[in-house]
Image: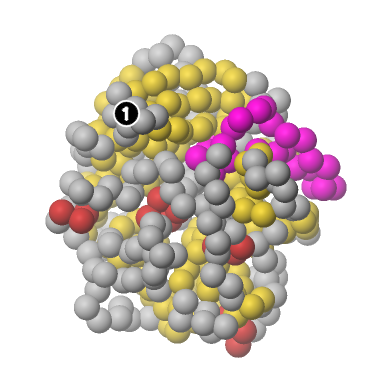
Amino acid sequence: MRKPHLSPRRPRRIGTGARTLPAAILAVAALVLGVVPADAAHTAPPPGTDLRPATLPAGDGPRVPWLVGGDTIADGQVRVRLPGSGKILLGASGDAYVAGLTARDGTARLLRVAPDGTRRRLGDGIDPYASVLSADGTRVVETRWDRRERTRVRVFDATSGALLAQRRFDRPGRVLDAGADRVLLGFSDPGRTLWWDPGTGRITRVATQAGYHASIRADRLATFTRDPYDGGCTVVRRLSAPRTVLWRSCDDAVAAFSPTGRRVATVPILTDGLGARSLLVRTVRGGEILAGYRVGGWFGAIGWESARTLLLDAHGTRRTATVRCAPTRCERASRAVPTTAPRAVAER
């Protein structure tokens, strides 16, 4: 049985399709497996706007940390180009950024990058593609599986790279989000969502379903009732009161919660391949559709710039750009570049 939404060892991608925001940490990247874009849960295209990146009017660059053009950190007036390949931006940490890349020797490296471009490697052997940055930017949390599908979670200082805590769990899982003193984890076989306090070692159960996306800031948690390839559905809850169900869908999965938690970007629940071709913006309560977007290729990174504005890496059939969309208008937040299919980065 496939469990794509919980695997921390997802295929690695380069270019504008890489994840860029910590809340996501990971969010859509966990929804993306395989090789061919597909909206398997929809028999007909959803309502919305067809995005053609090259024809959109040019607007301001991203106002939150974002990886544009596949190699440049953009954050307001800041522009920092990264070397190497397989680049990924975890997010802002104090006055710097935490990013990952694959060096010329093929090794994956986690870096602390200053706005002037100065780079310093964090720790040794930290896998940036299996890591998330805590909501406050102070911790990096890495998830790895062993051959027995046990999960090892390690917590590092985001400034020094020092190992602060680690724990092994006896089932497959992944980090959903983290704060300064707690880590939220989703597990399968059986489905569970747990808080782990690295300082005390305490484990607290949140839900008896597998969490696959969450935002501490927005106080939101998305779980699957069971494997979506076996008829599972999405349930959106309050993270602080997980018995409170805000929305349920058997057709769509959460890609990103807005900062306030009032809106949510969703993709078809069985999205496979490089990424979804369609995306909907909904209210969290009731799931009312506010906007929809389609693209000829696939959507890479999906995140919120503000409570009402999305940032999307839109890969058209010929051109790719970071796009800013409010409910009634979209514009380019980066220059348009030729669309290229990402290549996998070899596992270490």
Residue 63 image-quadrant placement = bottom right
Instruction: Identify the residue shown where x is 65% and y is 21%.
Output: 162
Secondary structure at badge 1 equals: loop
- Give percent across and percent down for residue 269: 28, 61
Query: Is residue 112 toward the left or the right of residue 125 in the image?
Result: right
Tell me if 99 is positioned left or right of 190 in this view.
right
Question: Residue 252: percent from the left, percent from the top?
Answer: 27, 62
Residue lying at 72% horizontally and 52% vertically, measured from the top left: 84
Q: Position of residue 316 (x, y in %)?
A: 52, 79
Magenta residues (range): 110-135
Residue 328 lies in the magenta-colored region:
no
Furthest toward the top, the residue is 200
Q: Indicate whether 162 appears above or below 128.
A: above
Q: Is residue 231 above or below residue 42?
A: above
The amino acid type of the residue labelled 1 equals Arg
Q: Can see residue 63?
A: no
Total marks in image? 1
- Quarter holding the C terminus is top right
Position of residue 43 measured from the top left corner of the image (x, y, whole percent): 22, 78
In the rendered structure, the answer to whether residue 346 lies left or right of residue 269 reads right
Residue displayed at 65% across by 41% down: 107
Return the residue at label 1.
148
**Residue depicted at 45% across the width and 27% down the height:** 153
The answer to which of 332 and 34 lies nearer the viewer is: 34
Q: Is residue 134 magenta?
A: yes
148 or 249: nearer the eye? Answer: 148
Q: Residues within 10 Å of mark 1 (few under 14, many from 20)?
A: few
Residue 140 makes an appearance in the image: yes
